[in-house]
Amino acid sequence: MGNLRWLTLAALVLSAGVALGKDARIEADPFLNFVVGDYVIVGREPDRGAPYSGTARVELREGGLLLNRRRGEHEVTAMGRFEVPSPPNEGRVLRFRWYDPEPVLMTCLISADLDNYARLTCYWLHEGSQPAEPGLEAMFPNRWKY
Protein backbone atom coordinates (compact mmCIF):
# COMPACT_ATOMS: atom_id res chain seq x y z
CA MET A 1 0.00 0.00 0.00
CA GLY A 2 2.85 2.42 0.80
CA ASN A 3 4.40 2.11 -2.66
CA LEU A 4 1.01 2.69 -4.26
CA ARG A 5 0.61 5.92 -2.26
CA TRP A 6 4.07 7.12 -3.38
CA LEU A 7 3.40 6.28 -7.02
CA THR A 8 0.03 8.02 -6.89
CA LEU A 9 1.64 11.13 -5.40
CA ALA A 10 4.36 11.12 -8.07
CA ALA A 11 1.74 10.78 -10.82
CA LEU A 12 -0.24 13.70 -9.37
CA VAL A 13 2.84 15.90 -9.22
CA LEU A 14 3.82 15.09 -12.80
CA SER A 15 0.32 15.51 -14.20
CA ALA A 16 -0.20 18.77 -12.33
CA GLY A 17 3.05 20.15 -13.74
CA VAL A 18 2.00 19.27 -17.30
CA ALA A 19 -1.56 20.53 -16.85
CA LEU A 20 -0.56 23.82 -15.22
CA GLY A 21 2.17 24.64 -17.74
CA LYS A 22 5.24 26.85 -17.41
CA ASP A 23 3.39 29.86 -16.00
CA ALA A 24 1.87 27.90 -13.11
CA ARG A 25 2.21 29.39 -9.66
CA ILE A 26 4.60 27.38 -7.53
CA GLU A 27 2.12 27.49 -4.62
CA ALA A 28 -0.32 25.34 -6.61
CA ASP A 29 2.10 22.40 -6.41
CA PRO A 30 0.35 19.37 -4.85
CA PHE A 31 3.75 18.17 -3.60
CA LEU A 32 3.45 20.80 -0.84
CA ASN A 33 0.89 18.52 0.84
CA PHE A 34 3.52 15.78 1.08
CA VAL A 35 5.60 17.70 3.63
CA VAL A 36 2.70 18.80 5.84
CA GLY A 37 2.93 17.26 9.31
CA ASP A 38 4.80 17.04 12.60
CA TYR A 39 8.55 16.44 12.79
CA VAL A 40 11.35 15.73 15.22
CA ILE A 41 14.43 17.79 14.34
CA VAL A 42 18.13 17.27 14.97
CA GLY A 43 20.76 19.71 13.83
CA ARG A 44 24.01 21.55 14.31
CA GLU A 45 24.75 25.28 14.36
CA PRO A 46 26.94 26.72 11.54
CA ASP A 47 30.74 26.33 11.70
CA ARG A 48 30.52 23.03 13.58
CA GLY A 49 28.60 24.74 16.35
CA ALA A 50 26.50 23.18 19.07
CA PRO A 51 24.20 20.27 18.26
CA TYR A 52 20.51 20.70 18.99
CA SER A 53 17.16 18.92 18.81
CA GLY A 54 13.55 19.96 18.85
CA THR A 55 10.21 19.67 17.12
CA ALA A 56 8.58 21.24 14.07
CA ARG A 57 5.21 21.45 12.41
CA VAL A 58 4.68 22.21 8.71
CA GLU A 59 1.28 23.51 7.63
CA LEU A 60 -0.13 24.45 4.26
CA ARG A 61 -0.80 28.19 3.93
CA GLU A 62 -1.78 30.44 1.07
CA GLY A 63 1.44 31.18 -0.76
CA GLY A 64 3.31 28.07 0.42
CA LEU A 65 4.11 26.47 3.75
CA LEU A 66 4.31 27.65 7.34
CA LEU A 67 7.04 26.11 9.52
CA ASN A 68 6.80 26.35 13.30
CA ARG A 69 10.04 25.13 14.83
CA ARG A 70 10.85 24.76 18.54
CA ARG A 71 14.26 24.22 20.15
CA GLY A 72 13.80 24.26 23.90
CA GLU A 73 12.03 27.53 24.74
CA HIS A 74 13.05 29.13 21.43
CA GLU A 75 10.30 29.09 18.79
CA VAL A 76 10.58 30.34 15.20
CA THR A 77 7.93 30.74 12.51
CA ALA A 78 9.08 30.62 8.88
CA MET A 79 7.49 30.74 5.45
CA GLY A 80 8.52 28.19 2.84
CA ARG A 81 8.05 27.46 -0.83
CA PHE A 82 9.68 25.56 -3.65
CA GLU A 83 12.41 27.42 -5.54
CA VAL A 84 14.88 26.65 -8.31
CA PRO A 85 18.41 27.22 -6.93
CA SER A 86 20.86 29.29 -8.91
CA PRO A 87 23.38 27.92 -9.58
CA PRO A 88 22.95 25.13 -10.73
CA ASN A 89 19.53 26.32 -11.99
CA GLU A 90 18.06 22.82 -12.14
CA GLY A 91 15.62 20.92 -9.97
CA ARG A 92 13.73 22.42 -7.06
CA VAL A 93 14.42 22.76 -3.36
CA LEU A 94 12.20 23.72 -0.45
CA ARG A 95 13.34 27.01 1.09
CA PHE A 96 12.26 28.47 4.42
CA ARG A 97 13.01 32.05 5.47
CA TRP A 98 12.71 33.73 8.89
CA TYR A 99 14.30 36.37 11.12
CA ASP A 100 16.19 35.38 14.29
CA PRO A 101 16.89 38.36 14.70
CA GLU A 102 18.73 38.63 11.35
CA PRO A 103 17.45 36.91 8.15
CA VAL A 104 17.94 33.13 8.01
CA LEU A 105 17.68 30.93 4.90
CA MET A 106 17.19 27.16 5.15
CA THR A 107 17.38 25.06 1.96
CA CYS A 108 15.93 21.54 2.17
CA LEU A 109 15.83 18.42 0.03
CA ILE A 110 12.81 16.17 0.42
CA SER A 111 12.88 12.40 0.42
CA ALA A 112 10.53 9.69 1.62
CA ASP A 113 11.20 7.40 4.55
CA LEU A 114 10.37 3.69 4.42
CA ASP A 115 6.70 4.41 5.27
CA ASN A 116 6.48 7.06 2.51
CA TYR A 117 6.39 10.04 4.85
CA ALA A 118 8.43 13.13 4.02
CA ARG A 119 11.93 13.48 5.47
CA LEU A 120 13.75 16.79 5.06
CA THR A 121 17.51 17.34 5.12
CA CYS A 122 18.56 20.96 5.21
CA TYR A 123 21.43 23.44 5.16
CA TRP A 124 20.89 26.78 6.85
CA LEU A 125 22.74 30.03 7.45
CA HIS A 126 22.21 33.66 8.35
CA GLU A 127 21.80 35.44 5.02
CA GLY A 128 24.80 37.56 4.14
CA SER A 129 27.11 35.56 6.42
CA GLN A 130 30.05 33.54 5.12
CA PRO A 131 30.31 30.53 7.45
CA ALA A 132 33.03 27.98 6.76
CA GLU A 133 30.22 25.39 7.11
CA PRO A 134 26.47 25.99 7.10
CA GLY A 135 24.18 24.78 9.84
CA LEU A 136 22.67 21.32 9.29
CA GLU A 137 19.18 20.12 10.13
CA ALA A 138 17.21 16.93 9.51
CA MET A 139 13.46 16.67 10.03
CA PHE A 140 12.04 13.22 10.70
CA PRO A 141 8.28 12.62 10.55
CA ASN A 142 6.78 12.28 14.02
CA ARG A 143 3.99 9.76 13.60
CA TRP A 144 4.40 8.56 17.17
CA LYS A 145 2.56 10.99 19.43
CA TYR A 146 3.92 11.21 22.96
Image (spheres, grey):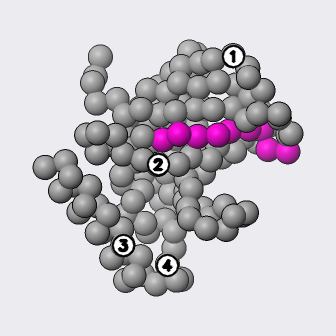
Please give the label number shown on residue 50.
1
Dot placed on the residue nearer the N-terminal end, 1 or 4: 4
* As drawn, 83 above or below 132: below
Dot placed on the residue nearer the N-terminal end, 4 or 3: 3
Q: Which residues are magenta?
A: 120-128
* As drawn, 73 above or below 32: above
Dot placed on the residue nearer the N-terminal end, 2 or 3: 3
Residue 16 shows in the view: yes
| Amino acid type shown at disc 1 | Ala
| Amino acid type shown at disc 3 | Leu
Disc 2 vs disc 4: Cβ atoms closer than 8 Å?
no
As measured in the structure, the alpha-carbon distance from the residue carrying label 2 to the one carrying label 4 is 21 Å
* As drawn, 59 above or below 62: above
Secondary structure mostly seen in the magenta stretch? strand
As measured in the structure, the alpha-carbon distance from the residue carrying label 2 to the one carrying label 1 is 24 Å
Residue 3, percent from left and from top: 20, 52
Query: Image quadrant of residue 16?
Result: bottom left
As measured in the structure, the alpha-carbon distance from the residue carrying label 1 to the one carrying label 4 is 41 Å
| Amino acid type shown at disc 4 | Ala
Please give the label number shown on residue 110.
2
User: 101 or 127: nearer the eye?
Assistant: 127
